């Protein structure tokens, strides 16, 4: 029986996912937050799971990743897309490449726009969209080599072409929603009701959002791969 656990970090509103093909098997984690490492380790131990791979969907700006702390404690393989500028990644994967953990298989989809290193991961009936596609929103495009034009292409030419019943699991949600579907986002997400990439760029370029509070700390820490003892 597949293990699928969605955990929430209240400080940064980040979703972290723990996935395995069953109790006592190998596991992978997507988008861990460093302060919650003990919680992940406890969950793994309770189900006798061996963490073998950990993935970040992109370089996060609002929290320090748990990638490196988990690697230190479990010797798991740290994975990001090949465009990542992180200095500590063990395995960089290409667009359309597969990541396997026993019976679990994820396909990487390069979805730049929020950052230039954003990847989404498709697993059977669900897609982990990072900050590219959010529930009822989309990731901002105004820093970390973001581009509203790239985001439009990632959304309309890649993610929204998936089957409409594909479940959407984002890296963040600020209103307590846990998941959505491609069809629901296509029809109801206000950011996606545009008729051209120029119209989308106009919206994104005029959001005037404040920088994430952790930006100056999180981005350098995530590039360098800090662990708890270095923070």
Image (spheres, rainbow, N blue to C red):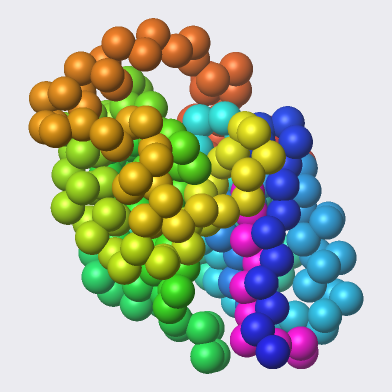
Q: Which residue sits at x=72%, y=47%?
A: 8
The quadrant where residue 110 appears: bottom left
- Provide residue 33's location: percent of width, then percent of height: 67, 46
- Provide residue 36's location: percent of width, then percent of height: 77, 48
Which quadrant is the C terminus positioned in? top right
- Which range is magenta? 14-26
- The magenta stretch spans residue 19: yes
- Provide residue 73's location: percent of width, then percent of height: 74, 64
* Magenta stretch: helix, strand or loop mostly: strand
Of residues 91 and 183, the one nearer the viewer is 183
- Residue 110 visible in the displayed image: no
Q: Which residue sits at x=48%, y=63%?
A: 167
Of residues 93 and 114, the one nearer the viewer is 114
Which quadrant is the N terminus positioned in? bottom right
- Provide residue 170's location: percent of width, then percent of height: 51, 49
Residue 59 left/right relative to 206: right
- The magenta stretch spans residue 201: no
Numbered circles on residues, count: 0
Q: Is residue 11 above or below residue 102?
A: above
Q: Is residue 92 above or below residue 7?
A: below
Of residues 41 and 138, the one nearer the viewer is 138
Of residues 156 and 43, the one nearer the viewer is 156
Q: Which residue sits at x=64%, y=33%?
A: 175
Q: Which residue sits at x=27%, y=54%?
A: 160
Residue 87 left/right relative to 8: left
């Amino acid at each position: 029986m597949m293990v699928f656990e969605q955990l929430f970090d209240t400080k940064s509103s980040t979703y972290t996912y723990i996935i395995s093909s069953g109790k006592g098997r190998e596991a992978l984690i997507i988008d861990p937050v460093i302060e919650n490492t003990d919680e992940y380790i406890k969950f793994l131990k309770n189900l006798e799971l061996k963490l073998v791979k950990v993935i970040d969907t992109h370089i996060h700006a609002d929290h320090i990743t748990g990638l490196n702390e988990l690697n230190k404690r479990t010797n798991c393989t740290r994975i990001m897309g090949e465009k990542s500028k992180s200095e500590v990644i063990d395995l960089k994967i290409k667009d359309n490449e597969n990541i396997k953990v026993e019976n679990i298989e994820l396909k990487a989809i390069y979805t730049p726009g929020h950052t230039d290193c954003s990847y989404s991961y498709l697993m059977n009936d669900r897609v982990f969209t990072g900050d590219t596609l959010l529930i009822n929103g989309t990731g901002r495009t105004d820093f970390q080599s973001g581009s509203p034009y790239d985001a439009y292409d990632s959304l309309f030419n890649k993610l929204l072409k998936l089957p409409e019943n594909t479940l959407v699991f984002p890296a963040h949600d600020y209103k307590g929603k846990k998941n959505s579907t491609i069809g629901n986002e296509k029809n109801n997400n206000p950011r996606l009701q545009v008729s051209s990439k120029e119209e989308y760029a106009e919206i994104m370029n005029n959001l005037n959002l404040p920088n994430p509070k952790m930006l100056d700390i999180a981005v350098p820490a995530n590039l360098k791969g800090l662990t708890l003892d270095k923070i």
